[in-house]
Amino acid sequence: MKIRELIEVLHCEVVCGTDFLDTEINFGFASDLMSDVLTLQQSNLLLLTGLSNLQSIRTAEMADIKCIMLVRDKHPSEEMIELANDNDIVILRYSSSMFKACGILYNAGLKPVY
């Protein structure tokens, strides 16, 4: 599933990274604990989180995650957007819950890590 397909399914907002919407995403992982994210070995991963700070971008950078979806209507700071742009990371915003986003994406064919 491409990032642009995720956007269509969830009707979410692209905050940054519009040049990378054709990136393939095969797996989804939802967590607000970045230590859990760092244990993952998957590539082509979407991270769903409500953690709207620089730590989520730094974690994505270390884990080679190219797409972060902020759930629960969280807004990224300008510093987050700048750091994501520097690392070619797409940031999406979704207004509803993480649970709802996961259910919709799972039904659309996105595979879980576990």
Image (cartoon, helix red, strand yellow):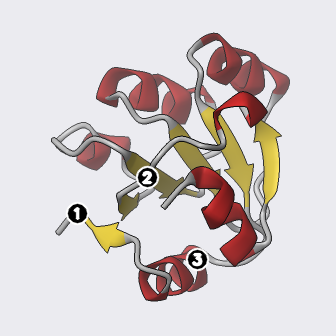
Q: Earlier in the sequence, mark 3 or mark 1?
A: 3
The percent coordinates of residue 31 (x first, y second) are: 40, 59
The amino acid pointed to by label 1 is Val
The percent coordinates of residue 37 (x first, y second) are: 30, 45
The amino acid pointed to by label 2 is Ile
Q: Is residue 20 above or below residue 31?
A: above
Seen from the viewer's position, the closer of residues 66 and 39 is 66
The percent coordinates of residue 88 (x first, y second) are: 59, 21
**Horizontal side, residue 51 vs residue 8: left or right:** left
Determine whether the residue tagged by mark 3 lies in a helix, strand or loop.
helix
Residue 60, by quadrant, is top left
Q: Earlier in the sequence, mark 1 or mark 2?
A: 2
Seen from the viewer's position, the closer of residues 94 and 19 is 19
Query: In front: mark 1 or mark 2?
Result: 2
For the point 37% across and 42% down, the residue is 34
The percent coordinates of residue 102 (x first, y second) are: 49, 77
Question: Residue 113 — which label?
Answer: 1
Question: Residue 64 — which label?
Answer: none
For the point 37% across and 48% down, the residue is 45
The amino acid pointed to by label 3 is Ala
For the point 60% across and 43% down, the residue is 22
Determine whether the residue tagged by mark 1 lies in a helix, strand or loop.
loop
